Amino acid sequence: MSISRSRGACVLFAVTTLFPAIVLAFQSELRKAWEPDLSSETIVFLSYRVHDAAHWFGLLTALDAIWALLFIAVVLRASTLHDVFGKRFIAALLLAQAFALACMVASPFPMDSDQFAYVYYGDLTLRGINPYTAYDRPLALAPQEARIAVHWGNPPVVDRYGPAWTLANAAVLAPARETTAEAQARLERVFAAFAALLCTLVLVRIVPLVPWSESAIVAFALNPLVIVAVGNGGHNDIYLVLFGLIAWWLGSLGLFELAGVALATASCVKFAYGLFFPALLGYTYYVSRSLTRTALTIGTFLLAVVLFSLPLGIRTSLVAPALDWNAAHASRITHYLWRAVVHIPHLGGVPNAPFGSIVPLATVACALAIATLALRGRRSPALEIAMAPLILMVPPKIESWYGIMLTPLLLVKHRFALIVFVAMTLACQFLQSRLFLVSYDPYLIFTALVVLIVALLAEVRPIETAAPAGN
């Protein structure tokens, strides 16, 4: 069923300009209602919570729902839009994505406090203060740092991101280090938006491996979660995705050693994608049948990780954030599993500690199974689809923007992977943990249900040959 060029342009316009603009305008009114005063010596960080939001939550949800429906409509009609726009399809898509991101980049401050934490870490690093160290006394802060410290503390919360991001973030902020915290936070948004556009370009290069490539590209480029979390929040998850996609691309070209470097870079932005490393090695050996090239891939990955970690200390910037922190803070989903078990008769005394290893071990097992299937020349799409939600559940908390990490699902040669990506990113957009009381987080329940559905489907769907999930 064909549609005219004008109707296609109208749908693209509505998804990428009209409804983001409406949501942005509503958020601006919300800020005015809470009267943040940016001229003061402190920055007031607004936080979405139910008990503060009775007067606006319904309207914002309705606006997001309409935006989501239009987004789904474009995903479903992406191939038709491609036929309508022809060679200009990608250009139109990038222009629409850039405009939507620009709307969010230009939105007022403050709304999301993480971007100010990035500024805090960057400024401290530039002054020679290691953000990975837990200081036992207050630090001497610059004026812009003191404004941020009202929310993030002095000394600040210890940096738990990867060293590659921390160093790059400091380098990006260096020219603006004497400007206000708001100006630096805006710069964080700009670079994050630019990274999102680069992700779309990389997807354009590698997504044609799947038959629904137009829908997959649209599913990322115009995704409400990506547009809001990147443009409005400047979240650094987008850099993790960018280098993860580059690693996949390089691996598909047979440049396995460079893929190892790219995957190491992604893992040193946030550690979640390090779990894809076994799959990369399995695929490397399957394609090359060379122990030498597999060993070189291991070497380039480890060398890059070490080089990124050296400037701020391997123990402080790599080992502690990747191992110690997660060991002391089990993923929240395992707490819910434990709470369910202790309500079973005669199991009320079961300790919580053993449950902390369930999700990490399941994720590692899934990665090893993908690597094993790569060595055998067989792929299980269900495993690839299941691994992405498992990665989301490894951290001790789950935030809505973590859904951006699901982007590799778009490269799996199984239509259900595209469906899971769209469904879960929209679920993350709606069911933010900050919108609900701490004791109730429906996103966690939704995630668990998706994993269960994938596991059930694995019994009936045949094994397919597909691009590796770990590149």
Image (cartoon, grey):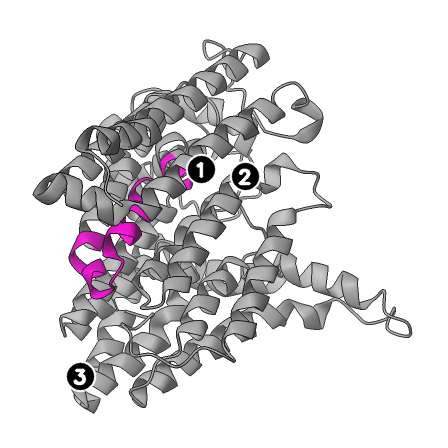
Residue 68's tag is 1
Q: Nearer the viewer, mark 2 or mark 1?
A: 1
Residue under numbered circle 3: 293
Name the residue located 29 percent from the left edge and 79 percent from the top edge.
465
> Which stretch appears magenta?
203-227
Q: Are marks 2 and 1 in contact (CB under 8 Å)?
A: yes
- Could you tell me if residue 387 is visible in this image? yes
Q: Amino acid at mark 3?
A: Arg
Q: How many marks?
A: 3
Residue 366, image x and y in percent? 47, 76
Answer few, some or many: residues within 10 Å of disc 2's Cα (few below 14, many 20 plus, some between 14 and 19): some
| Residue found at the far left of this picture | 87
Q: Amino acid at mark 2?
A: Phe
- The alpha-carbon separation of the residues under discs 1 and 3 comes to 45 Å
Residue under numbered circle 2: 430
Name the residue located 70 percent from the left edge and 73 percent from the top edge.
354
